[in-house]
Amino acid sequence: TVRLFETGDEVCATVEDTGVGMPPEVVGRIFEKFYQGNPSRAAEGNGLGLALVRRIVELSGGRVGVESAPGEGSRFSVFLPAENR
């Protein structure tokens, strides 16, 4: 599910799934360069995607976060300043 909304002086985009979710130890490291929460998928990427997302969002004056729990899916949120309304 993708949602877009405005919260005061920010706009927010969320992407949510109902997948397997992530344990707290993975959630705490998911935005680190080269970190891969599931080592069995190491051949599918290099662990840079979310680190780059975080850097781009922060350079734009925003913030990014994730909420997740095993068996409950994940929700990624990107908050950016609401300029040029």
Image: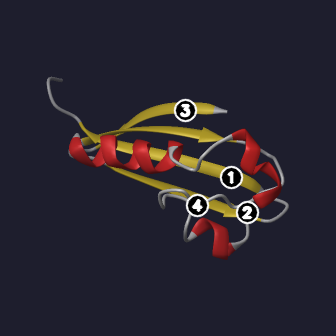
Q: Are the residues tagged 3 and 2 within 8 Å (C-beta)?
A: no
Q: Quadrant of the C terminus?
A: top left
Question: Which quarter of the picture shows residue 59?
Answer: top left
Q: Amino acid at mark 4?
A: Tyr
Q: Nearer the viewer, mark 1 or mark 4?
A: 4
Question: Is 74 displayed left or right of 71 in the figure?
Answer: left
Q: Secondary structure at mark 2?
A: loop
Residue at far front of view: 43
Q: Are the residues tagged 2 and 1 within 8 Å (C-beta)?
A: yes
**Residue 67, relative to residue 23: is it above or below?**
above
Using the numbered discs, state the Cα–Cα distance from disc 3 to disc 2 in whole angstroms.
21 Å
Using the numbered discs, state the Cα–Cα distance from disc 4 to disc 2 in whole angstroms.
14 Å
What residue is shown with label 3? Answer: 3
Residue at coordinates 55% horizontally, 71% vertically from top-left? 28
- Mark identifier at residue 74: 1
Give the mark, 2 or 1, whose residue is nearer the N terminus: 2
Rendering coords of residue 5 (x, y %): 42, 34
Q: Nearer the viewer, mark 4 or mark 2?
A: 4
Q: Amino acid at mark 1?
A: Ser
Label 3 Cα crowd, 10 Å radius (few <14 / some 14-19 / many 20+):
few
Using the numbered discs, state the Cα–Cα distance from disc 1 to disc 4 in whole angstroms.
17 Å
